[in-house]
Image (cartoon, grey):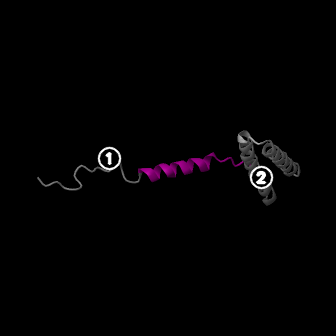
Amino acid sequence: MHRNADAGFRPYNEGMARGWESKSVEEQQAEARTQRSPSQPKLTPSQIRKKQQIESLTLSRKRVEQQLATAHEPRHQEMLRRALADLDAQIRKIAESS
């Protein structure tokens, strides 16, 4: 009995119309555009830069906090605490310069 190599193979989306995935994506994108609040003020380049700096410093702070949680050596813990204090000071300085 000769069997076709493709016999029994069924595509996962055999019963669906073509393009259904892209239509869903298009709908999601349209919804996201309409959900954006037009009342949000546009940020100046300086404000955008400050926001990015704060976000970057906040991510660094989270990483240092995670390292501190797993650090066992007292000297390393102290170094990480100083790093946290420095990051907090930098974040405060940028936030206050608004």
Left of 1 or right of it: where is 92? right
Which percent across, then down, holds residue 31? 57, 47
Disc 2 residue type (three-letter): Lys
Which percent across, then down, holds residue 40? 73, 48
Instruction: Inspect the magenta stretch and tell me whether residue 31 lies in it.
Output: yes
**Few, some or many C-alpha atoms within 10 Å of disc 1 (few <14, some 14-19, many ≥20)?**
few
Residue 76, numbered circle: none
Instruction: Inspect the magenta stretch and tell me whether residue 28 lies in it.
Output: yes
The dominant secondary structure in magenta is helix
Disc 1 residue type (three-letter): Gly
Of pointers 1 and 2, the one earlier in the residue sequence: 1
Left of 71 or right of it: where is 9? left
**Residue that label 2 marks:** 51
**Residue that label 1 marks:** 15
Is residue 42 at least partly visible in the picture?
no
Q: Look at the picture and state if 79 lies above or below 45.
A: above
Query: Which sits in the foreground, 45 or 10?
Result: 10
Question: Which contiguous range is marked in magenta?
Answer: 20-40
